[in-house]
Image (spheres, rainbow, N blue to C red):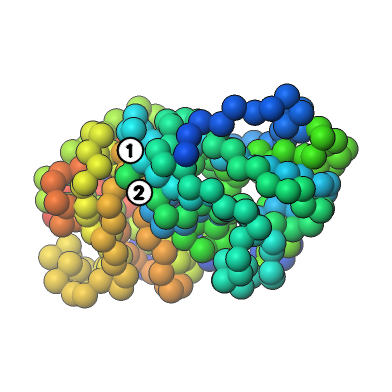
Amino acid sequence: MKHCKHAKKLLVLLLCFAMLAATLSSFAVFAEDAEAGKTSIQNGSGQRGPVAVTKTFSYRAIVNGSFDGFAFCMPTYNKTDSEATLSVYKWEGSYSATVAKSPIATQKFAPLKDNAVNYVSFDAQPAGEYLFHISDPKGQVGVWTNQNPTDSKGFLYLNGTEQRGEPELYVFFEGGNVPAEPFGNCQPSAELRITKAPYTSSKNKTPGNLTVSMGVRLNVNAAFNGVDFDLATYTATDLEADISVYAWKDTYAATVAAAPLATERLVLVDNAMQGIVFDKLPAGDYLFLVHNASKPPAMYVFSEVTGFKGYVYKDGFPVT
């Protein structure tokens, strides 16, 4: 199958390749002793950015000492009515088995404060493997993360799907007694979802307004199970759109005339990566599309990009 021609503009898009890993409510004021034990889970290097919480967002970590609190740093995109529930679970071997149990502690933050470090405290828990969980988002809710990090010790779960990524998550060790190695290396529990941008470098990121639809055609060389777009709503909190994946059928018109292989309607979050996950699709030629918006959002594009072999489509026509 031939690669598509190079396009001058590129939607900010991440394809999520499925591959087995061999190893791998309000702003809190911290007490002095709690602050002394505050330790970030982040171990790798990567690019900081917000990830939208559309349903659930979690992080699994092996904690190597007794701890009595945790906190996520969470943007609300300047909104004052956002809400979410933060919980901690003992890890039970899989994501589904873990969240089926009762949490060790849970707290609803209503409202969330923009970019606050939202802190949950509880009776001290022993060293072990735990899931730190965000659920029941209302309004604009995100988590600051280290995207595509190196040397991660734990695993991120976006709507229950295991992948790489490091949130701005802090664990509070009891009495300020932080171990020399605060966190251990988690082993993968299932297929690991790895995000990959379809280009090698990019410059000059700007929002490109949708009128009807915007998407990208790519020849994907590995099996994958998700797609994310970087979208803007210009602070609107009620904007919805469909994100869909189509098998390419020679022309744009023939492609979108067929049923999508995967589709989901989302309430969009301003200035954040957001998308859908689905059953694994094989390598092949695909169209990834944002369409049927309740009112036009914007999709971030690059005016300069290298290493991209695809077509960008706006309202059904290729962008040159």
In the image, is 191 to the left or to the right of 267? right
When asked about the image quadrant of residue 163, the answer is bottom right
**Residue position for label 1:** 81
Q: Is residue 289 visible?
A: no
Q: Is residue 88 visible?
A: yes
Identified at 69% across, 70% down, the residue is 93
Nearest the viewer among 32 and 50 is 32
Tag 2, which secondary structure? strand
Count of labels in the image = 2
Identified at 76% across, 33% down, the residue is 37
Q: Which quadrant of the figure contains the N terminus?
A: bottom left
**Residue position for label 2:** 138
Tag 1, which secondary structure? loop
Asked whether disc 1 touches disc 2, contact meaning CB atoms under 8 Å apart, the reply is yes
Nearest the viewer among 152 and 204 is 152
Relative image position of residue 223 (x, y in whole percent): 48, 69
Amino acid type of disc 1? Answer: Asp
Identified at 46% across, 42% down, the residue is 109
In the image, is 206 to the left or to the right of 294? right
Q: Residues within 10 Å of mark 1 (few under 14, many from 20)?
A: some
Q: Which quadrant of the figure contains the C terminus?
A: top left
When asked about the image quadrant of residue 114, the answer is top left
Ranked by sequence position, the earlier of labels 1 and 2 is: 1
